[in-house]
Structures are given as structure tokens and as C-alpha cells.
């Protein structure tokens, strides 16, 4: 008995045997998908391999038009992955376009049961306040022998795999030189 998959397969084989090449049609279909998109080069955020990706966005850049990501693929000009993506990286579009993706600040106050929506100014003020409070309470200025160390180990800073050298330079400047934070780590191999 012929099932749907077998039928489709035989159709493709038949077309090839009869001298029809479907490769051109397949390539055309792929082209149509991205023929009117804007390309943005970026880095896969999932792991430290840091593969290069091209993000295809649809939208005519009109003031009221919201751009939509329609396709993400490996960047053939990128020296790390040369166009390939692993099975996780190839799903990147579903990470970007996902109704469960958090795009606003949600805050749960100490002791509260529910999260409430806040604006970004609230988040920045709150983080700054907590960082200063933690540093004021826990900075170790001297070691046991009275030597100056200025070490803050109660805070840690973690970067991601899309952070490049320049980001990481600024991160060390701000957090180690500026706030005396000792634990600083990131996984980028850019
Ligand atoms: S595509 Fe795969 S290997 Fe490359 S950075 Fe993303 S998760 Fe890592």
C-alpha cells in the first residue's frame, strides 16, 4: 500500500527520471522566502561557539510598520561556522518570534505572590539601588593582615556568548575597576 510519504517520494523520483529537475523550483521557493527581507548579521546566543547568523526581517521600514523576523540562517562569510548551524542554532527564529518571550519588565516584590509589570526606569533604579546597598554592606577593604584589597565577592557579573572584546573591556572597567567586583566571567569566544 502506498502511503503519502512514498507517493511524494515517487513523484520526485519520477520527475527526475522524466528529465524534470525540481532543484531549480526548490531554490526559487527558498529565494522567494527571503527576496524582500533586510539582512542583519548577528551571533547565535546559545553557546560559546558563537556561530555567525543572518537574521532576515520583513517590513518596509515605514514609521508605523513593525518589522517581523521571518528567517534565520548561518552566515556563510563567518569564519567560525562558514554558514552551518547546529540543530539548536537552526531553531533561533523560534526564540526571537515567540509569544512566550519576555519583552517587558516583570517585578515580584519581596513577599509578594504575583509579578507586576514595571517600566525600564524602575528596573534600572532598583538594580542600581541594590548594587550600591550590597557593595556598601559587604566590600572587604582590608585582608586579615591589614593590606588593602578592596574586594567585592558578594556580587558576580556573567556575560553571554554574544559579548565581544569591546563589551567585555567595558564590563571589566565598570564592574572591576569601578565597583571592585571580583567574580566576572563570560563564555564568548568571539
Ligand atoms: S549554532 Fe549551535 S554550535 Fe553554533 S553557537 Fe549556536 S548553539 Fe552553539
Image: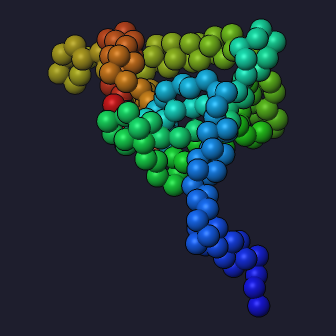
Q: Which of 153 and 143 is in front in this view?
A: 153
Relative side of 27 to 6, left or right? left
**Residue 55 appears at what percent x and percent y?**
57, 32
**Rendering coords of residue 93 (x, y %):** 63, 40
| Residue 2 appears in the picture as rendered | yes
Q: Is residue 57 visible?
A: no
The quarter of the picture where the N terminus appears is bottom right
Which of the two residues, 120 or 24, is positioned nearer the viewer here? 24
Q: Which residue is drawn at 63% across and 44% down?
A: 28
Q: Position of residue 13 (x, y in %)?
A: 61, 72
**What colour-coding does the image apply?**
rainbow
Please tell me how many numbered marks the rendered image carries. 0
Q: Nearer the viewer, residue 62 or 95?
A: 62
Relative vertical location of residue 35 with respect to residue 5 in this rendering, above or below: above
Q: Decide: is 95 above or below 122.
A: below
Q: Quadrant of the C terminus?
A: top left
Question: Which residue is drawn at the image coordinates 36% and 28% (left, top)?
Answer: 184
In which image quadrant can residue 71 be found? top right
> Can you tell which quarter of the image residue 130 is in?
top right
Question: Which residue sits at x=53%, y=40%?
Answer: 73
Farthest front residue?
19
Amino acid at each position: 500500500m502506498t502511503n503519502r510519504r512514498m507517493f511524494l517520494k515517487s513523484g520526485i523520483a519520477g520527475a527526475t527520471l522524466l528529465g524534470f529537475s525540481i532543484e531549480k523550483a526548490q531554490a526559487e521557493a527558498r529565494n522567494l522566502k527571503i527576496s524582500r527581507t533586510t539582512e542583519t548579521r548577528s551571533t547565535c546566543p546559545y553557546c560559546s561557539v558563537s556561530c555567525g547568523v543572518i537574521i532576515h526581517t520583513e517590513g518596509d521600514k515605514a514609521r508605523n510598520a513593525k518589522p517581523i523576523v521571518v528567517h534565520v540562517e548561518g552566515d556563510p562569510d563567518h569564519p567560525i561556522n562558514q554558514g552551518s548551524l547546529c540543530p539548536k542554532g537552526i531553531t533561533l527564529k523560534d526564540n526571537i518570534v515567540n509569544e512566550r518571550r519576555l519583552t517587558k519588565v516583570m517585578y515580584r516584590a519581596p513577599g509578594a505572590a504575583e509579578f507586576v509589570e514595571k517600566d525600564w526606569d524602575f528596573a534600572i533604579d532598583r538594580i542600581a539601588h541594590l548594587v550600591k546597598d550590597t557593595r556598601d554592606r559587604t566590600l572587604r577593604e582590608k585582608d586579615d593582615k591589614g593590606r588593602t584589597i578592596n574586594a567585592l565577592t558578594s556580587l558576580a557579573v556573567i556575560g553571554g556568548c554574544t559579548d565581544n572584546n569591546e563589551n567585555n573591556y567595558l564590563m571589566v572597567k565598570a564592574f572591576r575597576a569601578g565597583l571592585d567586583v571580583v567574580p566576572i566571567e563570560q563564555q564568548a569566544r568571539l
